[in-house]
Amino acid sequence: MKMLRKYYLKEFLKAFLIVAMGFSVMLASVDLVDKLDKFEVKSAEILLGHMALVLPQYLVYTMPMASLFAALFLAGQAMRTKEALAVMAAGGRLRSLFLPIAITGAFLSLMSFGISEFIAPAGVRSAKAMTEGQRASLFKKGTLWLRAEDGSIVRFFVYSKETRRARGVTIFRFEQGRLSERIEADEANYTDEGWLLRGVSIYDFDEARVRREKSLPVRDFVSSGFLEKEVLSPEEMGLKDLYEYSERLEKAGIRNIKVAVDMHSRLSYPFVNFFMVILGLALALRSGLGGLASTSLGVAVSLLYWFGYTMGLSLGYAGIFPPPLAAWIVPVFFAALSVGMFVKIKE
């Protein structure tokens, strides 16, 4: 029994790595082809480097499907070759036989979270730098520092790409290498005609005076498209960064549902790896499917999960579902389904 457990665990990990790495490399290759025209230099070293940088992100995406396929394949083979029936005839229990694989599924969830939190964001940032160039700004914990088109130094306390609104805007203007004016604005909105600052205080150092304006249009400033490129996307931030960014948005009075949904999905997506392993084992052991039938079932379940999960996130982005419900409703459903089927496996 112990030797059989080790054998099954080895075969599971082998199948998991083949599927996960295979699909991840395929997606990274598609991503590379899509961005090929953005590379200034197209050497093999640079192109392969870009693929290596985005690979962790796609690995996180494909791990649930790989977990399901590996579990279906392994348990299906055990049923097809009658090994599982032999264990049952000898007085063994199927749940006990595949317990190490179920525990491995829990470790896969932890590994997926670790990759998505500590490795993938850094890789995506570096990959973007290869195709879009280094960022011309400093972005830290939601605060953005950059140089405007007129040479001014600008600080945004927080900026929302979705609403194109900013809070806590400070503009430092220079003349002949010295600070001549500082503009403080409570908020700024980007319109078709440029930026409109509100709640403005202008500190004129040349005339040593302060004047205040309810609103102030600023045209020779920073384009919204440039800002959207400079602000980190959720894929470039870890959970801690997303939380801090969300807190700053909330503190500034900017409601950004997408950030809240993405923050919850960063937790819910790795969570499902464990239950995909449980579900794969339960489906194969209960149905006795193997080979092509097992693969077809894996594809069907994976598509069903992807459709439901993306639909839930879309409803969250639209404000129809609250962020926690949008990110967790489908993973929790699959978790309940997998546990229910696993405990009902005939012993």
Image (tube, grey):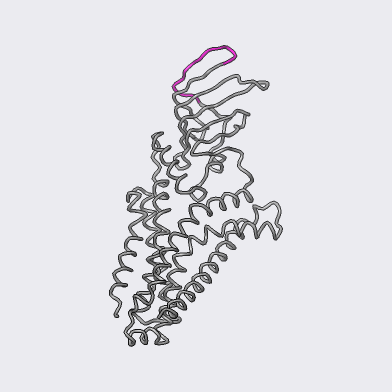
Q: Position of residue 50 (x, y in %)?
A: 62, 56
Q: Nearer the viewer, residue 172 or 270?
A: 270
Q: Is residue 237 left or right of residue 275?
A: right
Can I make out residue 248 in this image? yes
Q: Position of residue 63 (x, y in %)?
A: 47, 64
Residue displayed at 64% across by 20% down: 178
Q: Magenta segment, which residues?
A: 205-216
- Image quarter where the N terminus lies is bottom left
Q: Position of residue 172 (x, y in %)?
A: 57, 25
Residue displayed at 59% across by 56% down: 53
Residue displayed at 57% across by 57% down: 54
Q: Quadrant of residue 245?
A: top left
Is residue 209 magenta-colored? yes
Q: Is residue 31 left or right of residue 214?
A: right
Q: Nearer the viewer, residue 141 or 177?
A: 141
Q: Is residue 29 above or below residue 186?
A: below
Q: Is residue 136 above or below residue 185?
A: below
By secondary structure, the bulk of the magenta-drawn segment is best described as: strand
